[in-house]
Amino acid sequence: MSDATEPGSYFVANYPPFARWNKAAVPDVLAAFAAPPTQEPLGLYLHIPFCRKRCKFCYFRVYTDVAAADVERYSRALAAEAGIAASQPAVTGRRLRYVYFGGGTPSFLSVKQLERLVGGIHGSFGWDDAEEVTFECEPGTLSEPKVQALKSLGMTRISLGVENFTDSVLEVNGRAHLSAEILRAWDWIKAAEFPSTNVDLIAGMVGETTDTWQQTVEKTLALEPDSVTIYQMELPPNTVFVHDAKETGATTAVADWPTKRAWVDWAFGRFLDRGYSVSSGYTLVRDPARVHFRYRDMLWEGSDLVALGVASFGHLSGVHYQNATHWDDYLSAVESGRLPIARGLRPTKRELLIRELVLNLKKGRLDVERLRHKFGVDPLEEWAHEWRWLEAEGFLDEIAPQPVLSRRGLLQVDALLHRFFGPEPAAESG
């Protein structure tokens, strides 16, 4: 991988890669919904695609400057889709183990819209037994009454998209909020006493310097969140930054990978000094006995995930799927009572093994025994050459009884995971 941050996706979110997913697999997805339920944990993801502004590094399906009537129509469609999905044989009667409101900006919705949406989810799924209900927030969309409403609606984990504390950095990267809104929102969040609080940061944003990064880390430490998630800035092809660079011929001034890794390494050191523990290549927690990531851990270990909303990604009975990626296609399907599936993929058993191996390695160590028991394959033997190479290059502290990444390996884990990928099959249509 080049040291420069070039256009392309670095973060490994799933396996097989999304480029493999296709329309021809839609019948497989529908068959998975119509099949008897699995014994895997069940989760629910809801995509809220609205934002006050589109961040220049954002690659998600989001909409800005939307009419109030459109927001209302979409929030009603989410509740309707929940009813359709919950009535499918693979889902009916199963209890949700986790729920995740992502975006976009879930906190863009009004309190009344949130109350109606949550009421619809409870009417179809219910989440009274859920171990975790995560809700993503953008600071400028919060008010004290809305924060209190989130607590009363049953959100157990609030994740605040801070990204940076320097106003000039926030502005040049297209963030809608400024630092004063972060502090105001955090006071409301702390006062509400959610069971778990998280702060998101991004290392290497345009305009970042060592000084501004270290100031951001110190100000985050002062907030004392239960966890902090630190991403390294990348430039997926469908971002404003990449589009503008193509138009002008200029490069986008994102810090290179060695610089970003050094900044994150420094941040990890500061959080560890303050008593935090490493939870993955991106996360640290204050109290690992109390603070968990149920959404992450269950999903990475093969749980079923029903995905609601435009362009959202799900996983059911070993089959991957994505909802319709365009507004009209999504709404027309849901409003006519159909699951809005656009594409999917039925991975092989080996591909599911690779998926769990690479995703779980992002946590810094691999539970070899769990994979042996689940897939009947010893990953230490199957990928012996890869483990030896990683150890020789200083990316592993040990191989047996379970591979453990070194700090150096942890900070560039996504660049290492491709070594475990299988050979690419012939191109598929769709």
Image (cartoon, helix red, strand yellow):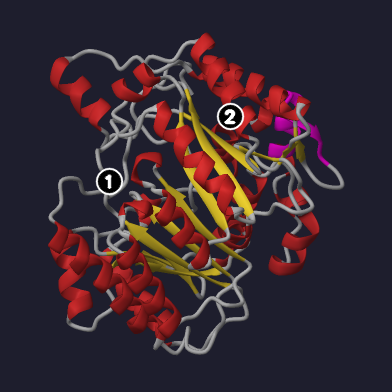
Q: Secondary structure at mark 2?
A: helix
Q: Residue at x 49, y 14 (%)?
A: 212
Q: Circle 1 sits on which residue?
A: 51
Q: Nearer the viewer, residue 34 or 107?
A: 107
Q: Residue at x 68, y 54 (%)?
A: 292
In the displayed structure, 169 sits above or below 147; it is above
In the displayed structure, 197 sits above or below 268; it is below
Left or right, residue 340 beside residue 197: left
Label 2 is placed on what type of residue?
Thr
Where residue 220 is drawn, which disc sits there?
2
Label 1 is placed on what type of residue?
Cys
Asked whether residue 394 is drawn in magenta, I would say: yes
Number of other residues with Cα within 10 Å of mark 2, as a class: few under 14, some 14 to 19, many 20 or more: many
Number of other residues with Cα within 10 Å of mark 1, as a class: few under 14, some 14 to 19, many 20 or more: many
In the displayed structure, 268 sits above or below 332; it is above
- Determine the CA span between mark 2 and mark 1: 23 Å
Is any atom of residue 162 visible in this view?
no
Query: Residue 409: image x %, image y %?
Result: 67, 29
Magenta stretch, residue numbers: 386-399
Asked whether residue 385 is drawn in magenta, I would say: no
Query: Residue 68: image x %, image y %?
Result: 16, 58
